[in-house]
Amino acid sequence: MLCLFILLVLLGFPIAFTLIAMGVGFGYYAYYQGPPEIFSDIFNNNIFYLLNQNTYSVMENDTLVAIPLFLFMGYVVERANIVSRLFFSLYMAARNLPGSLAIAALITCAVFSTASGIVGAVVTLMGLLAYPAMANANYNRSFAAGVICAGGTLGILIPPSIMLIVYAAIGNLSPLRLYAAAVFPGILLAGLYIVYVIVRVWINPKLAPKPNLEDVPPPSKIYWDLLVSFVPLTVLIALVLGSILGGLATPAEAAAMGAMGAMILAMIYRSMTWQKLKESVFLTAKATAMVCWLFVGSWTFASVFSYLGGHDLISDWVIGMNLTTIQFLIMAQLIIFVLGWPLEWSEILIIFVPIFLPLLEPFGVNPYFFAMLVALNLQTSFLTPPMAMSAYYLKGVLKKQIELVEIFKGIMPYLGIVIFTMVLMYIFPGIALWFPDYLFGTYVP
């Protein structure tokens, strides 16, 4: 089942419906009760009942209600020109630092990712906004592309991440604890990206020449523009996350507040039109439908896989290897890292992560610590050729301005930074666990 799934995905079949088809196909065999006596008995098979129940379970899952609301919040922010104001204000404020445009792009990506959680939207918008500015300043094309691709992937790690909502539903974990656990790893990774840019440009200034600014506004205007563009969006994000982590609202309620706040911001900036609102609603519905069908397919596929003994087979094999806890963690992350070459985060998370979840208790692994390792590791699925989706998103908007090989070259250093961050988390688990334990008490299985 696993090998056939990977093969079909690589051939280009839609993931959600591939999962449903394979679940129904193998499930029909698993629940087969003999040849039918009449034609209508062909459909007298428990797999159809299972598919129906899984569809209903997705529809009534309260955790998943947050997904369309967070998506809508992100699309409104994207289309209301709030991000462009933020980028140019940050650039003016950081103009004296090495690689100021790149730093402004990374901070904007981090903030927009927090408001959006949509990797494709962040990379696409920043490709249209930041890359031309860096190209006009004679930045190295590969270096500029790497900054945008790496910064855009922060959205699947920094809360409110859509990926963490999906993980919470798959692993039956608290989204509140997951969000709290992701705060410091997300800040650490974004900070390391910025440090890398500053050091790299300081060593080799030719990568990012200082632009000649003829008309620099006075400092008072620069910081006022930054205040106007940065503070409202940051306050909105802080209110959304604060209400979740403080226990004042569920993720769905906080997401609804964020969506409403994004609409209010767009109206204050006078940048929301009826056409942009319709686009935001349509894109939200489209993305939500994809996620929900992925859940229906993955739960059907996983149920049949487990019924046929797949999980037991893998569990017995891994436990029989007599691995230590560290060896198990390294093996699991290596497998997920390799899967990131041909697959996207959604396939890895929905199909392969559930295989490892039952093994966490025998090896004494905190599920929230494991979730953060996976969340960091899934950054690599966007940065690892040949299926580095962030590179394809950027290439799609830049077209002939840059070659795909140049983008791949630019993202390689950031791939190393992600791996280094994972090593730091192995050595210092408190990076992920201290904050949720402080807010909600020590986790007890």
Image (spheres, rainbow, N blue to C red):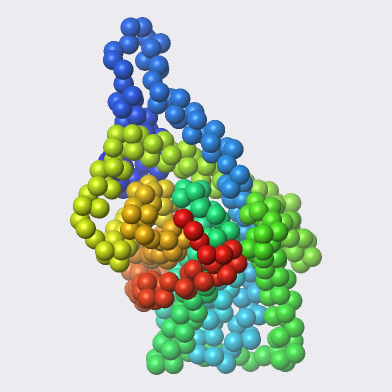
Relative horizontal placement of residue 156, taking residue 402 as reference (left or right): right
In terms of depth relative to the viewer, which is nearer, 368 or 156? Answer: 368
| Residue 41, visible in the rendered structure | yes
Q: Residue at x 67, y 63 (%)?
A: 246
Relative horizontal placement of residue 234, taking residue 425 as reference (left or right): right
In terms of depth relative to the viewer, which is nearer, 74 or 95? Answer: 74
Whole-percent x and y of residue 436?
55, 66
| Residue 145, visible in the rendered structure | no
Q: Is residue 336 above or below residue 136?
A: above
Q: Is residue 414 above or below residue 64?
A: below
Q: Is residue 288 above or below residue 202?
A: above
Whole-percent x and y of residue 357?
38, 51
Q: Residue at x 75, y 90 (%)?
A: 220
Whole-percent x and y of residue 373?
41, 64
Q: Residue at the top extreme?
A: 38
Q: Residue at x 62, y 81 (%)?
A: 90
Relative horizontal placement of residue 99, taking residue 265 as reference (left or right): left
Relative horizontal placement of residue 43, taking residue 319 as reference (left or right): right
Whole-percent x and y of residue 376?
42, 66
The total number of labels drawn is 0
